[in-house]
Amino acid sequence: MGTARPKQPPRHPTRVDPPESPPLRHEVTQVARAPAVQYRDDTTTSLIGSVLAERYRILSRLGEGGMATVYRGEHMAIRKQCAIKVLHPDEAHKDDIVERFLQEARAASVIDHENVVEITDFGRTEDNCVFLVMEMLDGEDLADMLARVERIPWPRAKPILLQICDALAAAHEKGIIHRDMKPENCFRLEKRGNADFIKVLDFGIAKITSESVVGPRALTQTGMVFGTPEYMSPEQAEGRTVDRRTDVYSLGVIMFQLLTGDVPFRGESPTTTLVKHLVEEPPVPSSVAADAGISPRLDEIILKALQKDPAARFQDMQEFAATLRTVDDLGTSVGGLLLGLADTNSPSDDLHAALAGRTRGRVIMVGLLIIALGAIAALALRSDPEPEPSEAPIVAPEPEPEPEPEPEPEPPPPETVTLTIKSNTPATVINPETGEELGSTADEGGIELLKADSAVELKLVADGYADATIEVVPDDDVQTKAKLKRSRKRKKSAKSATAPTGPVNPFDKK
């Protein structure tokens, strides 16, 4: 495997307005208002189940972003499913956001290319619900695909890249520059037996150079930075004027990521990522993923697309696509050198060394470092503000149940001692206070008594012997002796021996 590089979640488009930039004022294009949203019933404001513009029924939610939510919908008349993108209510009153939303609809609809998502409708209801309607796409974007497979081989990447080239070439011909090309905005689906059919999405921050599309007003001006840091060209990162070659650079980053599994530049923050685009040479792709089979020819194509100077890149998407088409499935081609840095059959280490040597020889490097320091101060990225969540109703917390009392510990068993009594005859030992028989003096193990510091009186009882009493102090095992006396038998008197046993007659004299 190549050198492991940490993965980070994809970033949302970022905008920077330098402090000296004057605020922009927008006059929102007037769009005829559609009837208010028809909610499912009077008890809910959820759009699911509601009707937009009297013709689109909202079926379910597909996803949500910082400014809008995308729903699965259906045209009520023709029963055709569609995707409906609805601005969040707290964004719908911002004129620049609404205008940019409308620009997305105009830009995509005017391109009219099979590899660009089709937008069929745009509307704004009387209760200020702003929406656009797109074709329904079932599949996944390239970011989700890369998260699942990490990277793809060149034979699979080639037709994907060519479709993106064709889509962007069609956009550029209409005067539309995307400015936010990244895997998240390239959607793959199955169409006409092609499992990797690509649709380019999200022209929301596109630069439109044709007044026939957007009119004379500009939504951005020099010094404003829009885009996703990992995919932004150096000129875009600096806030300079951009043209179609900024999309060439971004597609070079996507090609790098498709083949290696990572982007060429990733900093600890958006600002440091932008600085890397400005001052660092990209790594040679084959050195990042040594086992991916990336040929020197593919290395050259990617590095040409990632040149800092726009004049050194492919000058348009047609040139980029034409070069890709010359490369066979093994990554080789009969074309000449692109960068003049190395022979096409030389190892990538030579290419990397040539890049490093050229970097060291640059006279303008000091100037770029100064620009980088200025970028850290001036390009402090701040993301488009997320809508503040509405305050949730205050709910009194439920009282915590009182803890159950801990069960009282069982008292330790009473301590006992052993009493051994040696007697002249086996005798039963009795507690005279309770009458309890404790044992016998004949028990081999003795008699168990509760340990105590005071004297205890015990009674010994045996047949034919007089009861005997002993006293012991059971503070420890005790041995004692006891002697029982035989009981005396009473002799019968002569009188009693001759006394009659029946009734006596007092008058009977003998």
Image (tube, helix red, strand yellow):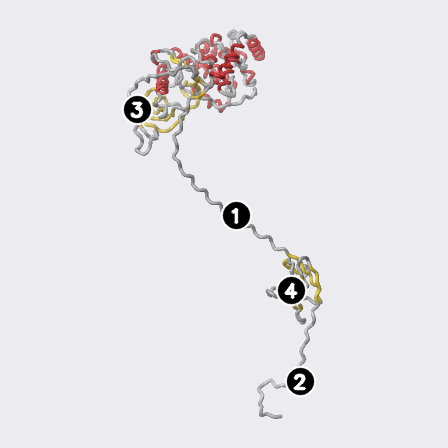
* Residue at numbered disc 3: 125
> In the image, what residue type sits under mark 3?
Thr
Q: For residue 315, what is the image quadrant?
A: top left
Q: Give 509 or 242, whichever is nearer the viewer.
A: 242
- Mark nearest the camera among 2 and 4 is 4
User: Where, quadrant-wise, is the C terminus in this rendering?
Assistant: bottom right
Regarding mark 2 in the picture, which secondary structure is present there?
A: helix
Residue drawn at x 32%, y 27% as measured from the top left? 57
For marks 2 and 3, the one nearer the N-term is: 3
Q: Label 1 crowding class (10 Å Cα cut-off): few <14, some 14-19, many 20+? A: few
* Residue at numbered disc 4: 457
Regarding mark 3 in the picture, which secondary structure is present there?
A: strand
> In the image, what residue type sits under mark 1?
Glu
For marks 4 and 1, the one nearer the N-term is: 1
* Residue at numbered disc 1: 406
Kindly tell me whether residue 77 is visible in this rendering: no
* Side of 354 relative to 245 (left or right): right
Q: Are marks 2 and 1 in contact (CB under 8 Å)?
A: no
Q: Label 3 crowding class (10 Å Cα cut-off): few <14, some 14-19, many 20+? A: some
